[in-house]
């Protein structure tokens, strides 16, 4: 079965924009409507779009995303918007008979208390992290909907990729909306420009996170498009190793030339103690990321300097 026309949701977001600049995407006709053209929260509009353009492959990368501050501040929107978008896109694809779909999940779907690597069969086996529970619930429901549809109709193969934390070009750097690494880059850049002698870190900085460069996720998606039949129904995309929050601050400081100290605010929330995905399925499938942490930070900081001034 050949793929000719791909519908990409979230084409204006970080993941979507990285995919759109991947050299391999030029082999396909890609529809990437922005939110002004298509409100994914409106099922009738989504269904009409699918009926009009008849895509034969869907990549659902759209979502309301943000860091710990945004998730704590807006739990209703993170649950409702992501649930509506996921349900509408997947249901419309089913309604018109789109044969193949890739849904992007999140490592937030995994239980909060597990300190080892997180395997795909662990979804719904434990309590979720409260600080982003709404977002996680929406991602779980969408993934399960994909799974159920494929069980009922073998002609519709809807699969879920679960990336680790992603950073990179086209990221959000505003602290009110950003994830850890872009927030660190913004914070260190500001401190360096202001001549600040120290930078604050929430908590003790010992919580561990796995961050992969966004260009590598785009490459994984391209590999998934071209090798869809061998793609597992659920599969993590990640590095297989992680670093402490303190490590990320130190690595970014080296790249950015910040020489100040770090101070810890132990009154602030830090989220899950560790979130590391298992990459056994990914390795067996035959894909691995290309960028080191330093390379990813260098490219992201270059983008920040070009676009955030």
Image (cartoon, rainbow, N blue to C red):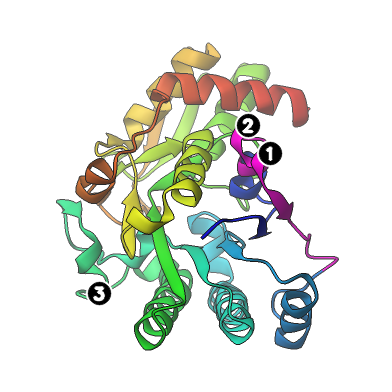
The kind of secondary structure element at disc 2 is helix
Specify the segment rendered in magenta. 19-37
User: In the depicted view, which residue is nearer to us: 70 or 86?
Assistant: 86
Mark 1 in CB contact with mark 3 (< 8 angstroms): no
> Which mark lies nearer to you, 1 or 3?
1
- Measuring 48% from the left and 57% from the top, which residue is drawn there? 68
Name which of mark 1 and mark 3 comes first in the sequence. Answer: 1
Q: Is residue 247 visible?
A: yes
Residue 23 in magenta? yes
Q: Is residue 175 above or below residue 131?
A: above
Q: Which residue is mark 3?
A: 127
Cα gap from disc 2 to disc 1, whole angstroms: 6 Å
Mark 2 in CB contact with mark 1 (< 8 angstroms): yes
User: In the depicted view, which residue is nearer to us: 161 or 204?
Assistant: 161
CA neighbours of label 2 inside 10 A, class few (<14), some (14 to 19), many (20+) = few
Residue 101 location (% of width, % of height): 51, 66
Cα gap from disc 1 to disc 3, whole angstroms: 42 Å
> Which mark lies nearer to you, 2 or 3?
2
Residue 223 location (% of width, % of height): 45, 43
Tag of residue 26: 1
Looking at the rendering, which quadrant does residue 119 occupy? bottom left
Q: Which residue is mark 2?
A: 23
Mark 2 in CB contact with mark 3 (< 8 angstroms): no
Residue 44 location (% of width, % of height): 75, 88
CA neighbours of label 1 inside 10 A, class few (<14), some (14 to 19), many (20+) = few
The number of discs equals 3
User: Is 111 positioned to the left or the right of 33 in the image?
Assistant: left
């Amino acid at each position: 079965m050949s793929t000719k026309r791909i519908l990409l949701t979230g084409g204006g977001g970080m993941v979507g924009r990285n995919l759109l600049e991947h050299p391999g995407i030029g082999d396909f006709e890609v529809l990437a409507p922005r939110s002004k053209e298509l409100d994914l929260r409106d099922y009738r509009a989504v269904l009409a779009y699918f009926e009009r353009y008849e895509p034969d492959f869907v990549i659902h990368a759209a979502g309301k995303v943000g860091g710990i501050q945004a998730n704590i501040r807006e739990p209703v929107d993170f649950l409702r918007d992501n649930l509506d978008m996921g349900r509408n896109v997947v249901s419309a694809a089913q309604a018109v008979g789109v044969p193949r779909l890739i849904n992007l999940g999140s490592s937030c779907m995994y239980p909060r208390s597990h300190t080892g690597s997180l395997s795909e069969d662990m979804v719904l086996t434990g309590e979720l992290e409260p600080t982003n529970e709404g977002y996680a619930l929406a991602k779980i429901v969408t993934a399960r909907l994909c799974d159920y549809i494929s069980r009922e109709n073998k002609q519709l193969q809807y699969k879920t990729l679960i990336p680790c934390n992603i950073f990179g070009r086209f990221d959000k750097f505003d602290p009110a909306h950003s994830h850890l690494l872009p927030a660190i880059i913004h914070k260190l850049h500001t401190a360096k420009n202001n001549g600040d002698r120290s930078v604050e870190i929430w908590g003790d900085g010992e919580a561990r996170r796995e961050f992969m460069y966004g260009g590598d996720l785009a490459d994984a998606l391209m590999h998934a498009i071209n090798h869809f039949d061998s793609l597992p129904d659920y599969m993590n995309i990640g590095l297989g190793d992680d670093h402490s929050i303190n490590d990320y601050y130190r690595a970014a400081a080296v790249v950015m030339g910040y020489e100040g100290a770090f101070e810890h605010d132990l009154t602030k929330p830090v989220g899950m103690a560790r979130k590391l995905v298992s990459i056994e399925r990914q390795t067996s499938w035959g894909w691995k990321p290309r960028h080191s942490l330093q390379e990813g930070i260098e490219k992201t900081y270059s983008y920040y300097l070009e676009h955030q001034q």
